[in-house]
């Protein structure tokens, strides 16, 4: 117990050191504080990286830093910005921002919307995480007035305009390019990656809670209600994989036409990789990584599946099946450090073609099958929500043994996560925050209400009675 307490104390101290100040106000945390290597963009505050830190601060009662972060990133959303002579859309949230200082000593913020990123990929997940975090802040503080401010309501509408815009597409899922989410390099997740769909579903639920009725917003309140239903149906119906579903796909006929078609996406049975036929347990299942015309990505992606549990995108029985799979394929998905970002890794010619011979994404490294400690908080949260805390406890015990000794690295390499990542930063803030958040969720599962969704009635139960009745009326209208 003393070892655990000292470990947690060290993590708290490291987390405090990562705080970024804008003037005299805390506004976020830097990505990493590794003194042994050049900072590059790790001295910036990334929106997705800050989420576990923000949840830790909310649990700790340090709510001002989260409020300041939400306010400043919202202001960055509204600024005019150009990238290679193209104007970025208004609802776009930055991937990261940095506090700079003028020669006279005044502070100002500069944001990166993808124009400086490797591959110049615009982040899609930033605006989704922002809505989810705004909802968590309101739940922790009761400060509904912040979300109801005109600028916040306008910010929500701008994001929804981007996400719900009419387009050359008939699927309810969100179409995005490669590198638009946590997997921010070329990894074949372009199209309709699960991570974005899970975040999209959670963000739409959060927006449904936060939007006020009024001109223009009434349209989006109705659109949210409609989209949530069809998105949930689409993901559960077509992304779900288990042994029964694999057997069905294995016997598919191709080239079917018309309304009676069973193989609606024209998936050829020959495209089922041999590994998944051997790997899928008798009891258990998961959501596929991607789906499109004649394409199903059978890889297991951790963030998308765990977030699907927290957002109730999957049913209760499917959530249990995902946890069954993790438990039965523990060595592959957890190994020596929770948790593997995707499984299996791309290798040989497939790695060359899909990643473009990316030297950082070699097999079983970085985003190509690396183990990321930050995913531990999502695993513990999903374990608590499904009533399987033993899975979270078992994963935490592994992390406790290694993280401090390895100096809190960004990611681990190897098929079982035995090696500290070759290019991994030490003292990575979201590794530290992910550990602290996992510990907090394990000790007090009630913190789940900040990040968990459980259907409309339960989702709205925290609101004042009058507001709850008004919101239910809006959603049913």
Image (cartoon, rainbow, N blue to C red):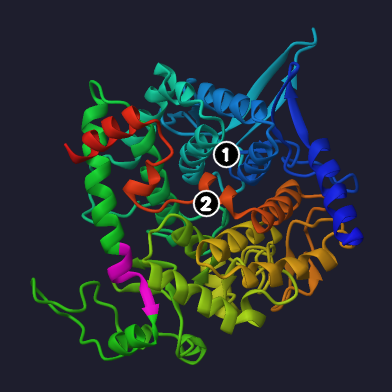
Disc 1 is placed on an element classified as loop
In the depicted structure, whether residue 161 falls above or below residue 8: above
Residue 302 visible, this orientation = yes
Query: In the depicted view, which residue is nearer to us: 165 or 390?
Result: 390
In the depicted structure, whether residue 160 falls above or below residue 455: above
Q: Give the range drawn in magenta.
A: 235-241
Question: What residue is drawn where x is 67% and y is 63%?
Answer: 366
Q: Quarter of the image containing the N terminus? A: bottom right
The percent position of residue 425, horizontal first and vertical second, equals 79, 53
Give the side of residue 462 with respect to residue 46, left or right: left
Q: Quadrant of residue 115?
A: top right
Residue named by callout 1:
95
Question: What residue is drawn where x is 46% and y is 62%?
Answer: 309
Question: What residue is drawn where x is 11% and y is 75%?
Answer: 257
Q: Quarter of the image containing the C terminus? A: top left
Give the side of residue 221 with respect to residue 448, left or right: left
In the depicted structure, whether residue 111 falls above or below residue 165: above
* Residue 255 is inside the magenta segment: no
What's the CA distance linking mark 1 and mark 2? 10 Å
* Residue 238 is inside the magenta segment: yes
Residue named by callout 2:
181
Give the side of residue 430 with respect to residue 476, left or right: right
- Say which label, 1 or 2, has the lower sequence index: 1
In the depicted structure, whether residue 246 falls above or below residue 19: below
């Amino acid at each position: 117990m003393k070892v655990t307490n000292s470990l947690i104390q060290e993590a708290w101290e490291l987390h405090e050191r990562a705080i970024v100040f804008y003037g005299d106000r805390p506004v976020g945390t830097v990505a990493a504080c590794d003194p042994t290597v050049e900072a590059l963009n790790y001295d910036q505050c990334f929106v997705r990286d800050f989420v576990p830190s923000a949840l830790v601060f909310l649990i700790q009662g340090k709510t001002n830093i989260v409020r300041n972060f939400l306010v400043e990133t919202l202001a960055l959303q509204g600024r005019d910005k150009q990238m290679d002579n193209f104007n970025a859309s208004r609802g776009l949230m930055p991937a990261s921002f940095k506090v700079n200082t003028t020669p006279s000593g005044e502070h100002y913020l500069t944001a990166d919307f993808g124009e400086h990123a490797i591959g110049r990929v615009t982040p899609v997940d930033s605006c989704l995480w922002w809505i989810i975090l705004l909802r968590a802040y309101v739940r922790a503080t009761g400060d509904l007035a912040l979300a109801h401010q005109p600028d916040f309501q306008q910010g929500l509408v701008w994001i929804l305009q981007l996400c719900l815009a009419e387009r050359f597409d008939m699927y309810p899922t969100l179409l995005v390019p490669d590198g638009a989410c946590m997997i921010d390099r070329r990894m074949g997740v372009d199209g309709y990656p699960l991570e974005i769909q899970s975040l999209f579903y959670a963000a739409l639920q959060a927006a449904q809670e936060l939007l006020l009725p009024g001109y223009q917003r009434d349209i989006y309140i109705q659109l949210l209600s409609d989209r949530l239903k069809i998105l949930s149906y689409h993901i559960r119906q077509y992304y779900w994989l288990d042994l029964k579903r694999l057997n069905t796909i294995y016997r598919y006929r191709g080239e079917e036409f018309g309304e009676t078609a069973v193989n609606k996406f024209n998936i050829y049975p020959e495209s089922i990789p041999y590994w998944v036929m051997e790997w899928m347990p008798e009891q258990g299942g998961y959501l596929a990584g991607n789906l499109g015309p004649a394409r199903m990505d059978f890889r297991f992606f951790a963030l998308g599946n765990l977030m699907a549990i927290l957002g109730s995108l999957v049913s209760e029985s499917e959530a249990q099946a995902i946890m069954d799979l993790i438990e039965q394929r523990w060595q592959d998905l957890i190994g020596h450090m929770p948790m593997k970002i995707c499984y299996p890794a791309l290798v040989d010619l497939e790695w060359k073609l899909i990643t473009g011979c990316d030297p950082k994404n070699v097999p079983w490294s970085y985003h190509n099958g690396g183990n990321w400690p930050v995913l531990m908080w999502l695993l513990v949260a999903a374990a608590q929500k499904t009533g399987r805390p033993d899975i979270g406890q078992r994963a935490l015990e592994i992390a406790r043994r290694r993280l401090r000794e390895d100096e809190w690295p960004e990611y681990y390499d190897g098929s079982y996560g035995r090696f500290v990542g070759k290019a991994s930063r030490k003292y990575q803030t979201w590794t530290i925050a992910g550990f602290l958040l996992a510990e907090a969720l394990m000790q007090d599962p009630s913190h789940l209400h900040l990040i968990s969704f459980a259907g409309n009635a339960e989702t709205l139960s925290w609101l004042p009675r009058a507001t709850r009745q008004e919101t239910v009326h809006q959603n049913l209208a």
